[in-house]
Amino acid sequence: MESSSNNALRPAAGLTRVFIWCVPRTLGTALTKCLSYVDGIQIFNEPFGSAMFFGPEGRTPDPDFVKFIERASANQQVIFEHAIDDSKCTYGWVKQQLEADYPGKKVLLVRDQAPYLDEKYDTIPSGFRHAFLIRHPYKVLPSYKRIVTKMRKRDMPNGYEMQFKLLKYVQEHLDPNPIIIDADDLQSNPSSILSQFCQAVGIPYSDSLLEWPADRDIMKTWIGSRIDLQGSLLEDEGGYYDKAINSSRFLPITAIPERSELSQDIQEAADYSMPFYEKMYQLLLKP
């Protein structure tokens, strides 16, 4: 086990590789945009999500999702320089791309959702440090419900349970000391959290990362599915990325809702999610 873990953490010479695992609505897009301005960085945006939803091994889409794909395919809000060919995007293909060399780059940063890995742990690429971005279920679940109702009328496995299972696998097999960040801490004290995170994973930190241009231009440099990226900008689909991608800094935190303020279905989902969130919270990176 020890030799396997050491091998998994051995990076390619000259290239720092970092994976950020999220569940939806945990500020993953805002953090990705922020880190996009690190010198010499290459961003991969949700490649396992592309394999799950758009690749040849993907799930059979329901009628609502087919309509979403059609609208996303027609959208041309951003012209991407490195769009993934969805027809090639199997889980194994993603692993190969993430283990490849990227001449001229200093950092390879991958942001993905833990549920999109679909417990295919053997396809996790080697050579990476791992981080997990979490957020209180009372904040995540109402936001996610609003977006999904507009965007994709389909069920998804419980995000917190999948994230916790992945965390345990990473600790036991890949990276014994993954970084765990709570989105509220990132919002309330970004300079402390970002600097600690960058130091822990080997990314150069500067206070210049605390503010960034309030436009979508940086998305052009991301590697990801064009359907996913374009679809996430569709306003009539909920604007999944819209607020984050047009941001210029981390906004102040909002209060955690009371349980009584949540609808019955959100309360039930939160009750199921909370134990997994609390276990991850115990390992949190502190401001």
Image (tube, rainbow, N blue to C red):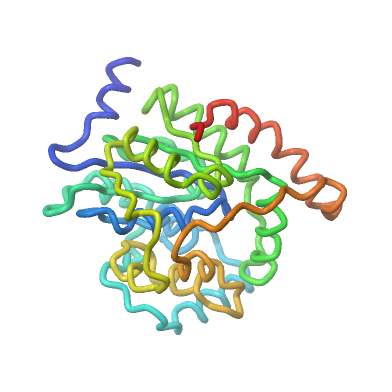
Front residue of 230 and 95:
230
Q: Is residue 13 left or right of residue 247?
A: left
Residue beneath the point at 58% across and 31% down: 280
Front residue of 56 and 132:
132
- In the rendered view of the protein, which quadrant contains the N terminus? top left
Residue farthest top in this picture? 2
Up/down of 235 relative to 201, above or below = below
Numbered disc total: 0
Q: Is residue 86 left or right of residue 71?
A: left
- Where does the image place residue 286, in percent across and percent down from the top left? 51, 32
Residue 270 at least partly seen: yes
- Where does the image place residue 133, in percent across and percent down from the top left? 51, 43
Residue beneath the point at 28% across and 42% down: 203
Residue 123 at least partly seen: no
Front residue of 185 and 264:
185
Residue beneath the point at 44% across and 33% down: 179
Front residue of 157 and 277:
277
Q: Is residue 138 left or right of residue 285?
A: right
Residue beneath the point at 34% across and 40% down: 198
Up/down of 11 relative to 245, above or below = above
Q: Is residue 33 left or right of residue 12?
A: right
- Where does the image place residue 231, in percent across and percent down from the top left? 49, 73
